Amino acid sequence: MDAKQAKLDDLKQKIIDDEVTPELAKTATQLVFGDGNPDAELVFIGEAPGKNEDLKGVPFVGAAGKFLDEMLEMIDLKRQDIYITNIVKYRPPGNRDPLPDEKSAFLPYLESQLEVIQPVLVVTLGRHSLNCFLPDLSISQVHGQPKRYKGRVYLPLFHPAAALYNGSMRQTLIDDFESIPHITSKIKLS
Ligand code: URA
């Protein structure tokens, strides 16, 4: 097995052993750890699993995930080319927003996930994901602009679920998404 995959499997088990957010674990079907290629240059980070993700154990498999797949195709990428995960790894009951305590409980594990994968670019989806790493930035002001912080580059994007049924946000997200290949090659040259 891929050495990175083995480390990610250990990390997944550690979340279970450490009993992170036991209340959420109780109401969720299962842990939704992450999916895709551990050697990816791009890591996408969403908010938390929804109903479909909770049932399947895979992030972004519902309507937002389908839209994400369509945007990946626009830049000639597939799920197998990227890695995708969420900040919070159990479904919050009724799809409520994750609580600050829940986000901070998972942050060290998310950091470890990124440390294993070592992506060129971290794409944050939505404000929760952006503000986990860069708390002072506002998504409406910085979307589409790569931000370098503590040795990593982040690209803040709107969340595909928020943009799905909002015409102008949808187009903005598509435009920002289409800039990913250019941003990635610029980082690799720098
Ligand atoms: N929204 C998210 O933020 N994550 C998922 O996995 C699905 C929908």
Image (spheres, rainbow, N blue to C red):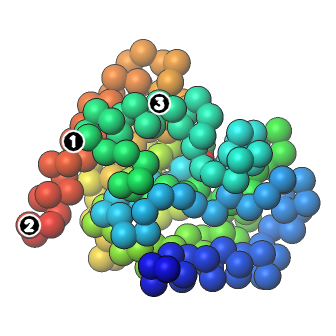
Of pointers 2 and 3, the one earlier in the residue sequence: 3
Tell me the tag on residue 179.
1
Tell me the tag on residue 67.
3
> What amino acid type is highlighted by mark number 3?
Phe
Across the whole image, how many numbered discs are drawn on residues?
A: 3
Query: Outermost residue, top direction?
Result: 167
Q: Position of residue 60 (x, y in %)?
A: 57, 43
Q: Which residue is mark 2?
A: 189
Nearer the viewer's eye, disc 1 or disc 3? Answer: 3
Would residue 27 appear left or right of 54 to someone viewing this image? right
Q: Position of residue 114 (x, y in %)?
A: 45, 72
Would residue 51 appear left or right of 169 to someone viewing this image? right
Residue 161, above or below 96: above
> What amino acid type is highlighted by mark number 1?
Ser
Q: Residue at point 43% right, 69% down? A: 38
Of pointers 1 and 3, the one earlier in the residue sequence: 3
